[in-house]
Amino acid sequence: MTPSDLHQDGTIIRFDATVLPTMEPHLFDAQWLRTSGFWQGSTQGRSQAHFFRYADHDMVLRHFHRGGLIGRVNRDLYLRVKATNSRALCEFDLLCEMHSEGLPVPLPVAARYVPFGPAYRADIITQRIPNAQPLQEVLGDKVLSAQLWNAIGANVRNLHDHGVYHSDLNCRNILIDTNDQVWFIDFDKCEKREPGAWTQANLDRLLRSLRKTAAGPLAMHWRETDWADFLVGYDSGYARAD
């Protein structure tokens, strides 16, 4: 990777110059992607992701939106901080570090910080993981083998062994591709941490996510014994690669 910064009237864009030798700021505009023929689709929900193909690369654009009650009156403005401490650039830098460590995360392509008075807005573009679906969707289609649950657990352990705290580890932010490879996405508000109780809290969050989804209106092929297979992989950590 070759991270570079582009400065434009207070806006800062950090991008990978090996993927984008020339940074086109319009890449952060979903409407421009549509009218220019690059847009390929999007997900629904609060944190909408736009899929597009540009410069022979499949990418994902995500605009940072606020959640909870505050999100009803303030969709996307954050209290202004230094650009290097902004949500988008922090996620970009963390992804760079994790990617260099060989962790199964998408390649960061570009991140944007846009000051707006005492606030700022932010966006990030990452590589699109090919032929991959969220674990939640995969579980809606089929039963996972004990071996695959072992692999998911081992890959979570790999993140923890590298000190990666995922602030929202759930069954939507774990992807499984058609080769049964495990990937992790959405590292907003995530960071590197020293070993501690946060690793167990991470596991508890994921288990709550699985139980909540399984209890929902959509059929999901998950049972409590799958968690035991997950923990076998997590405890053994056989997928670790330093």
Image: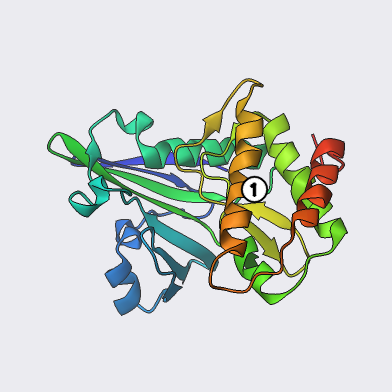
Quarter that holds the N terminus: top right
Q: Residue 153, relative to residue 130: is it above or below?
A: above
Q: Position of residue 22 (x, y in %)?
A: 40, 54
Quarter that holds the C terminus: top right
Q: Position of residue 30 (x, y in %)?
A: 32, 67
Q: Is residue 131 visible?
A: no
Q: Position of residue 207 (x, y in %)?
A: 64, 48
Q: Which residue is denoted by mark 1 in the rendering?
A: 207
Q: Residue 151, relative to residue 138: is it above or below?
A: above
Q: Residue 195, relative to residue 223: is it above or below?
A: above
Question: How many numbered callouts?
Answer: 1
Given residues 88 and 163, the one toward you in this image is 163
Left or right of 231 on screen, residue 88: left
Instruction: Give the residue drawn at x 70%, y 65%.
Output: 177
Given residues 74 and 31, the one toward you in this image is 74
Left or right of 11 on screen, residue 6: right
Q: Position of residue 40 (x, y in %)?
A: 45, 76
Instruction: Give the residue drawn at x 12%, y 37%.
Output: 117
Q: Is residue 228 visible?
A: yes
Left or right of 5 on screen, residue 75: left
Colour setting: rainbow
